[in-house]
Image (cartoon, helix red, strand yellow):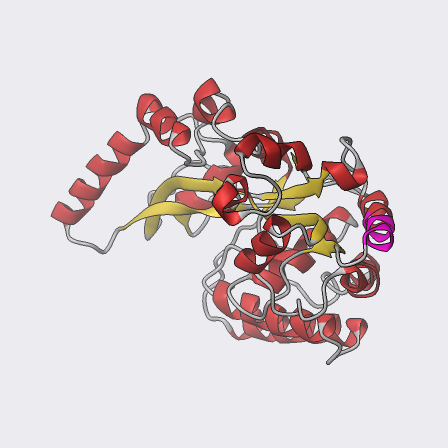
Amino acid sequence: MPTTPTSWRPTASFPQAETGKRDENASLYGLPLLGDTWTMIYRKDLIGDKPPQTWDEMISVAERCQADNPGVSGLAFHQANGSDAAAVTYNTVNGVYGGNLWNPKTRKIDGVLNDAAGQEAMDVLVNKMKPLTAKGSGNWFIDEVNAAVAQGKACIAFNWIAASGGLLDPKQSTLGTTREQILDKLGFATLPSQKTNLVPLGGMGMHVSAYSPEANQAEALNFMKWFEQADIQKKWAAAGGVPSRTDALESPEFLDAAPFNQVYTDSVPRMRDMWNVPEYARLVDIENTNVNAALNGAKAPKEALDDIAKEQQSVLDAASGKGGGGL
């Protein structure tokens, strides 16, 4: 199966096999279904055709754009305390500034997440990026960011590629009455780099549990075999899907389907996953709560990050299973 190594490892089995090879003793196995990552959405008519190449440059450009265009915020990004919104935002900034979420071999978070690089990332997020967002945006997620872009209220925004299709719909946008007019103003680019060029890994897998009845496993596997065929994947890509098969994501059917699809293909080698462990949901909840608190002024950035590290470490330390993984 010619899936990308980046998407295969986090979704193929649990416990996770770092090599991507099948583990005969795994209790859950599957295939990548929907691939995803963030794209940087920028107003070409306000900042120019060339997108910022570094994170620091992006912040500077957004600051200047906000100053030059009253009523338009420099940035729009996920800040909500729900799903994985605020956590992915911090993790993205953490990655580009050279930080790490944890040490998967030692299962250490405290002292890793909140090291100097992690603290710098939190400072950038709270003290440099947050002031460039709209008032009342402290609980924004996918829909709110898209609305700000479509209403012409943001110079630069970040959102998941799989959720960006509506930005090209004239019925949902004030940027133009046709798709072409909207694209005269909107550009889509890979995320800027800084100390690294890491981007968030998103999407979802298609899984079969080893504990389900054999008949159900067989039927599920039949569907998966059908769905993962090259021609089916290309048809799905042309219809708006974001495939994980290398041949599909590099195909004209995918690359020509939307202006941000090339961003996904170019981003795949840069992707970084979170923690691939059963305690994932608790770790995300801790991070969302504290990052959201820092973004909304309820906690100082350093306090929030130290609290995340300590609380997440407690969860891992208390867990009975060891799990594993993470890119």
208 relative to 94 in the view: left or right: left
Q: What type of secondary structure mainly makes up the magenta span?
A: helix
- Kindly give the residue lying farthest to the left in the view shown: 215
Q: Is residue 68 magenta?
A: yes
49 shown above or below 125: above
- Kindly give the residue lying farthest to the bottom in the view shown: 298
54 relative to 207 in the view: left or right: right
104 relative to 153 in the view: left or right: left
* Residue 165 location (% of width, % of height): 49, 41
70 shown above or below 289: above
* Residue 270 location (% of width, % of height): 64, 37
Q: Nearer the viewer, residue 255 or 31?
A: 255
Assign the N terminus to one quadrant of the image. Answer: top left
- Kindly give the residue lying farthest to the top in the view shown: 252
Classify residue 2 by image quadrant: top left
Q: Residue sitting at 35 percent across and 49 percent down?
A: 26
Magenta stretch bounds: 62-69
Q: Is residue 107 visible?
A: no
Q: Residue sitting at 70 percent across and 68 percent down?
A: 110
